Amino acid sequence: MTQHPNVSRPETAAGQAGALVIANPRSLPSFADIFGNRNPVEIEIGCGKAKFLIARAAENPQINFFGIDVVWKWMKYAVERTEKRRLRNLKFLKADARETVRYGIPPESVSIFHIYFPDPWPKRRHKKRRLVTGEFLKELHARLRENGLVELATDHEDYYHQMLNAVIHSGISWSSTRRAEGERLFEALAKTNYEIKYEAAGKTLYYLELEK
C-alpha cells in the first residue's frame, strides 16, 4: 500500500518514530488505508501518553485504535511506546479534536469515542472552551456506527453536570445513557494516567456512557 501524502513519521528524541502520525486532519486517508484493514475503529480524544490506548490495543489486535491530541510533548511518548511494543493497530494524529471530528472523520465510521478527563477550564470566563458541548456530541453521534459508544470521564463535578446538560441540548435521542460516580463503566482494568493519579488522591471521578 502506497503511503498517503498526509501520513508522516515525525522525529522524536529517540529517533524516527515508527508509529504512524497523520499530518492533516482535513485530509485524512480512510481508516482502511491508515490501518490496512477494515476492522472496527476506536478513537481517544486527548490521548496524551496513551496509557489507556496502548493497553487496549495490546489486548485487542482485532480492533484499530486512533489517538488524537494537540500536544506533541506528551504524544511523542505514546508514539515511542507504540513502536517499542510493535502495535500495528494503534496510530496517532496531532491536531485539534473539533477540527478532526468535523472535517476528517467520515459518518458512521467509529465504534467508540473515548474522552477521558478533558481540560475542565474551571474559570468562569474559560468555560466556553470546554470540549464537550451539545453540538460536539451531535457531531460524534453522526460519526458513530450503529450501537456505537461515547465514553466520558471527568474529575470536575461542574464539568460533569455540563456534560449531562450537553446530552440534553444535543437534541439526540441516545438509545442508552449510563452514568456512575467512582466506578468505571467501560474496561475497568484499562485506565489513563490521570485516572490513576486522581484515584490515588481520593478524588471523586464521574463517568458517562452514551450509546447510539
Image (tube, rainbow, N blue to C red):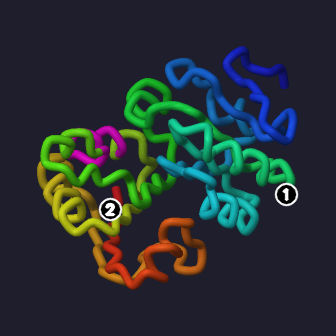
Residue at x-position 19% and y-position 46%: 127
As drawn, is 192 to the left or to the right of 182? right
Q: Disc 1 on helix, strand or loop? A: loop
Residue 8 in which image quadrant: top right
Residue at x-position 40% and y-position 60%: 117
Is the residue marked by circle 2 packed among few (<14), some (14-19), or many (20+) residues within 10 Å? many
The residue that mark 1 highlights is: 85
Residue 66: x percent and y percent?
61, 45
- Vertical relation: 163 (above or below) 19: below
**1 or 2: mark nearer the eye:** 1
Alpha carbons under labels 1 and 2: distance apart: 31 Å
- Vertical relation: 79 (above or below) 32: below
Residue 149 in which image quadrant: bottom left
The range drawn in magenta is: 131-140
What predominant SS class does the magenta segment belong to? helix
Specify the amino acid type for callout 2: Leu
Q: Nearer the viewer, residue 39 or 99?
A: 99
Residue at x-position 56% and y-position 71%: 191
Q: Disc 2 on helix, strand or loop? A: strand
Determine which of the numbered discs, if any, sits on residue 210 in the image.
2
As drawn, is 96 to the left or to the right of 172? right
Determine if the magenta segment contains residue 100: no
> In the picture, which quadrant includes the N terminus?
top right
Determine if the magenta segment contains residue 132: yes
> In the picture, which quadrant includes the C terminus?
bottom left
Query: In terms of sequence position, does the residue under pointer 1 or pointer 2 come before the other?
Result: 1
Residue 20 in which image quadrant: top right
Residue 74: x percent and y percent?
61, 47
